[in-house]
Amino acid sequence: MPSGNGGRPEEVVVVTGASAGLGRAIVERFARDGAAIGLIARGEQRLEHAKASVELLGGRALVLPLDVADADAVERAAETVERELGPIDVWINNAMVSVYSPIKEMPAAEFRRVTEVTYLGYVHGTLAALKRMLPRDRGIIIQVGSALAHRSIPLQSAYCASKHAIMGFHESLLSELLHDGSHVRTTMVQMPAMNTPQFDWAKNRMPHQTQPVPPIFQPEVGADAVHHAVRHDVGREFLVAWPTVKAVVGEKFVPGYIDRRLGRSGYEGEQTAAPADPNQPDNLWQPAPGNFGAHGRFDDRSKDQSVELWVAKRKPWFALLGAALTGVVLGSVGASARAASADASSPDA
């Protein structure tokens, strides 16, 4: 179906965890392109708000309330999207839940639940996308990851383990697509700490309110990175912002030092000074109430741009500039050498 994007066919995008936080920012970014978007999350009311936002920005939206831990529900959602919006071009796995707790205080059921949503939810979404994309030999699957896919931190063991699992799953998928010569493309976009409502609804056993580990970025930075990864083949993995780069490199070279540093300061870095509300609803087993949008409560401490992302989006131009500068420098050096040689051979020398 045509859209208001210059006569091109309407792009069909599916986003899990679409109702709030980073997912909501991703949805709004693609809505500006006039995309038709399948919105997957558990909370129907927030999904309706996201749909209204999509339509206001120029896109179309289909509300699909479900739990990504339910593989059959994800498959039915994919069928519904293709029936009502058209063939799926892009599938973005983003849904997650987390628990802030020392491992020794977490029951097994909570580990299982975080794994079923944050890891297996990605598997379910990927399987639904592949079922449709592989026969057409086209499509893009984005796995929204985190610096924590490379480097775990205390108090979020189940979430960190799930992100590590997604990375392992992603690498296997990459190898298999290459083996098959498939034109389906997949990228894992690794995020820094973001200002999302996660910190108002994650289950918390700690004495203080939780926070993203600074520096904090606005969710639109992550949404822009996902959008760029869809529009350009950025490779197997796309690292968003310097803290992500630092975590990935640091884990490769000085993991023991990071262990000790997190042992000293990790607990404090993930909490504010404000006491936690023991009666605050969480979203582990069901959606948390409230009309949450893309942003959390850290607007005054969050960056709205990433220098690393800005550079990454302009790599070809920087390569050309570097080549041009190299040419200028070499030309200058050559001219100076020729001038010196001419002076040396002059009869007046």
Image (cartoon, rainbow, N blue to C red):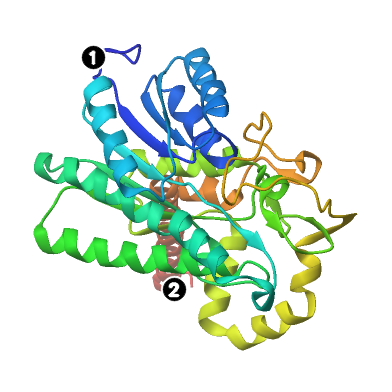
* Residue toward you, 281 or 215: 281
Which residue was labeled with disc 1?
1
Where is residue 220, by image quadrant?
A: top right
| Residue that appears at 40% across and 62% down | 166
The reply to whether residue 99 is in sight is: yes
Q: Nearer the viewer, mark 2 or mark 1?
A: 1
Q: Residue at x 34, y 32 (%)?
A: 13
The answer to whether any part of residue 89 appears in the image is no
Please give the name of the residue rendered at 54% of the width and 19% of the height, measured from the top-left corner: 53
The residue under label 2 is 344
Residue 48 percent location from the top left of the image = 52, 21
Of helix, strand and loop, which one carries label 1? loop
Residue 296 location (% of width, % of height): 71, 40
Q: Mark 2, residues whose alpha carbon is within 10 Å: few (<14), some, or many (≥20)? A: few
Under circle 2, the secondary element is helix
Q: Is residue 255 above or below residue 91?
A: below
